[in-house]
Image (tube, helix red, strand yellow):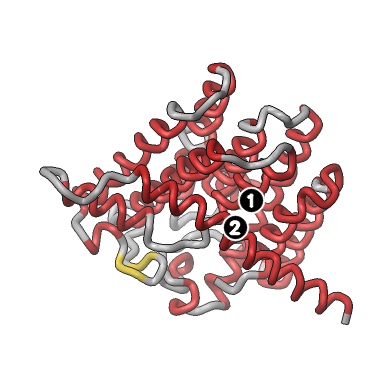
Amino acid sequence: MLAATTSASMSQSFERIIHDYSSRVNAQLEAILPAATGPAERLFAAMRYSALNGGKRLRPALCFAAADAVGGSDGNTAKIAAAVEMVHAYSLIHDDLPAMDDDDLRRGMPTCHIQFDEATAILAGDGLQSLAFQQLTELNNLPAETVLSLIAILSRLGGCQGMVAGQAIDLAATGKLVDLEQLKTMHAHKTGALIEASVLMGAIATRAATDGQLAALKTFARSIGLAFQIQDDILDVESSTELLGKQQGSDAANQKSTYTSILGLEQARREADKLYQTSMAALDLFAERADPLRAIADFIVKRNY
């Protein structure tokens, strides 16, 4: 009974947290995305369509929650959260293209290249990526070295040493058998890297985080990032297209190795729980200030979409 009560309480806490954080990042995105007018109207419309069409906003939420765990979120946090979300949105646009995963559905809506066209989708992704870094140059009252650190983290973990490398590894592995360690490497880059960037950037921008806190947050982010991917793999087997908002069973259809195909469902669940426990232990340092991070992590491993 206690576990059920705790789970329900955590769920209600997550709903409140995600509503607050989503409202803040959505307002920032609305403010900085160009209006769909003028000679580049189609490009701007595609950028807005992809960045504002819902989604769980977990990466911005992690950014805000990490800031609140160490020093408090502010207007700069909203800009950083928007930058991270735009990088995420651009990655989804490109991931859905026929040259990659060739998906028609994202968040319950036609993917960008279906709604517009392939060329516009590519340009929309390019535009969102560059606008993300523009956001980081417009942070207020931060020393230049802090801003450079934030830019370096996003370019490294969102680029060819992180998320982009993970996508390349994923494409190269399609149709091939990979072992568990290779799979972990792929997803630590493709999924985990941007989650790590979200957490670290939120904390660093406060200028209040100690080295020990940043190390703990890195452990948290890396653990929950892999747990996120394992849960995605489980849902690709167990959930439905309607709940997921994207094509269920696409991993098997595209001949991709997953945690469920290598470990089986039950072992995959155990691996996700182990990573979840590691992420929770890393937050002990922060006491109740990390409750938003705990609620987000709880959602990640228990969600059904």
Q: Are marks 2 and 1 in contact (CB under 8 Å)?
A: yes
174 or 21: nearer the eye?
Answer: 21
The residue beneath circle 2 is: 229
Quadrant for the C terminus, please: bottom right
| Label 2 SS | helix
User: Which residue of the protein is positioned furthest toward the top in this rendering?
Assistant: 144
In this picture, residue 22 sits left or right of residue 293: left
User: Which residue of the protein is positioned furthest toward the bottom in this rendering?
Assistant: 1
Q: Which mark is residue 225?
A: 1
Residue 235 percent location from the top left of the image: 57, 71
| Label 1 SS | helix
Quadrant for the N terminus, please: bottom right
15 or 148: nearer the eye?
Answer: 15
Could you tell me the amino acid type at mark 1?
Answer: Gly
213 or 275: nearer the eye?
Answer: 213
Q: Quadrant of residue 131?
A: top left
Residue 174 percent location from the top left of the image: 44, 54
User: Which residue of the protein is positioned furthest toward the left in this rendering?
Assistant: 39
